Amino acid sequence: MSQNILIISSTSGNNLSLANSLKEKLDPLGNESSILNLEEYDLPLFKPNVSAPEDIITSLLQKFNSADGYIFCSPEYNGGMTPILTNAITWISTAFPNWRDAFNNKSCLIATFSGGPGTRFLASFRSQCEYIGLVVMPRTISVTSYNVPKDESILKSLKQLMMHI
């Protein structure tokens, strides 16, 4: 049975390249996948008294709701998560009463292309994902300009995700 996996990239640079690479490895395994580049969504910075354009936030929620699982590709910024990723999740979680349907019991894999190993991002984002109801895979993917994981390791991570969807 084919699964719909949404690959979310926080940036248009290295993490989008990582997302495309993961999609190329994932699709031959019999899944449908699509890439969502958060930089293409003109979401304002979340503030309690500010509204996001309804069409943009609704489109984002529809993509999340239709996914069976996720791969998040994001760099580590200042020892944590990128603001654009946190902002998108915050808009989803505040704009819709049934927002948890987009996350509850769906599985995700966390990946990063960072200047360093990205361990602080991987740990902090894991915590956030678990909090919003996602089932986070124990394996992660960490890419740097001096350390690219072997294809075999990446395939194991992708197969682990597919087994849980």
Image: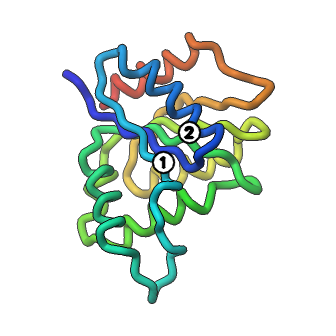
Relative to 136, does residue 78 appear above or below in the rendering? below
Question: Mark 1 sits on what residue?
Answer: 37
Which amino acid lies under the numbered mark 2 shown in the image of this protein?
Answer: Leu
Q: Please name the residue that numbered disc 2 is placed on.
A: 16
In-front residue for pair 161/149 = 149
Q: Which residue: 52% across, 44% down?
A: 9
Residue located at (61% from left, 62% from top):
83
Badge 1 element: strand
Residue 129 position, x and y percent, is: 47, 51
Asked whether the beta carbons under mark 1 and mark 2 sit within 8 Å of each other, the answer is yes
Q: Which residue appears at 36% of the width and 21% of the height?
A: 27
Question: Does 131 sit left or right of 32 as displayed?
Answer: right
Q: Is residue 45 above or below residue 100?
A: below
Residue 17 found in image quarter:
top right
Residue 50 is situated, as x and y percent measured from the top left of the image, at 45, 85
Residue appearing at x 75%, y 23% in the figure: 147
Quarter containing the C terminus: top left
